[in-house]
Image (tube, helix red, strand yellow):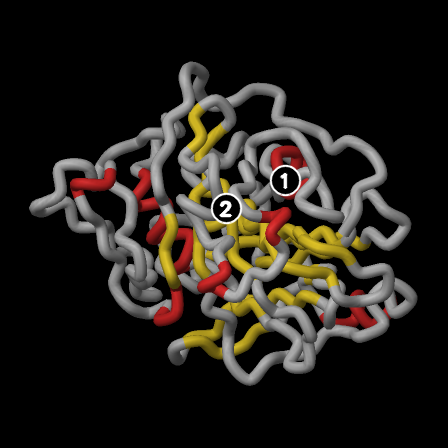
Amino acid sequence: MRRASSLLVLAACLGCGASSSSTNAVDAGDIDGAIGVDAADGGASDDGATAPPDDASQSVDATGDANAAADLDRDGLADAQELAWAAAYFPYYSLHPSDGCKTHGVLFRMMPHPQQPTRIVVLYDVLYDSDCGANGHAGDDEGFAIVFDPARPAPGGILAVRAISHQDTPCERDTTCGQCSGMSACSTAMRAGKSYPAVYPSKDKHGTYADTATCSANFICDFGGCALSAAPDAPAFVNAGEPGHALVHDLTTDGFITTANGWTHTELSHFDPWKAGNFGGAGDVSKDLVDVRFIVDTSGCP
């Protein structure tokens, strides 16, 4: 994905001051496992730790870990809890079975909803090693977001999903689904015995949609189409933190962009997601993380 113009930014950040660096990655190879937290690393998950159970009502256990309640990005949410929620409420991410460049990881930003503060917004920016479709390039980033109610376990607490494919290009298509009045119901797929909303990245180009019909209609840009995978994605997650209070500045040492994880483009190594500039031949991730177009009004949701 390549941007053609600047994105909107949030009118105000949730906190200001010196940034803090913290490894906040989790390997969700077993997305229904248990998150590991180590007090020695500032409350960050251990390398190789797995994601939390799908019952997201379960809080991270602070026993034996004085930093489990740490809120280094100062958004009012404990960083370990954010990581647990990000994985537990992650939709059924349906990578196309024939995608030719699947290597990826998920950078996310989580915050209280600016209009409905008892609800939580998660912006997921999926970063790929390559766009291997037409006019392909090193690096790719495609985003979607959810709003969830933390009082309701996943997946029932997922109130809305919004995906924006190929932002700020003629190929952009915005799709939204959810439980709110006036919204289309999300298509679903089974994960760990539960019916999750599904999100569809297109084959090779990774344009992301909340439904397959819009993906199919955008065939000039995503001619490979979208399809339901046989199993849900199990990516690595990294918590970006907040503007002014970043939790990561290097997605190689603090994240997932490593040769061991299958990444091949050296120009993407040691990428700082909060530093202005494109992710390889794709867009500016620092702008993705503050793009208000991803925030869905859920006032009409139960």
Whether residue 267 sits left or right of residue 14 in the image: it is right
Q: Position of residue 64 (x, y in %)?
A: 8, 46
Q: Residue at x 73, y 61 (%)?
A: 131
Label 2 Cα crowd, 10 Å radius (few <14 / some 14-19 / many 20+): many
Q: Residue at the location (50% across, 46% down)? A: 108
Dividing the picture into quadrants, the one containing residue 88 is: bottom left
Asked whether residue 182 appears in the rendered view, the answer is no
**SS for tag 1?**
helix
- Which residue is at 91% across, 66% downward? 220
- Which residue is found at the position 36% from the left and 45% from the top? 24
Residue at which label 1 appears:
285
Q: Of all residues shown, which one is farthest toward the front?
A: 266
> At which x and y percent is residue 297?
61, 41
**Disc 1 packing (10 Å; few <14; some 14–19; many ≥20):** many
In this view, the mark in front (2 or 1)? 1
Identify the residue position indicated by label 2 in the image. 108
Name above or below for residue 93 compared with residue 20. below
Query: Which residue appears farthest toward the bottom when viewing the image?
Result: 230
x, y percent for residue 283:
72, 43
Q: CA distance from mark 2 to mark 1?
A: 11 Å
| Relative side of 95 to 231, left or right | right
Mark 2 in CB contact with mark 1 (< 8 angstroms): no
Residue 66 lies, in percent from the top left, at 13, 37
Residue 40: name its quadrant. top left
**73 or 102, which is in the foreground?**
102
Q: Amino acid at mark 1?
A: Val
Residue 135 visible in the displayed image: yes
Q: Amino acid at mark 2?
A: Phe
Q: Secondary structure at mark 2?
A: strand
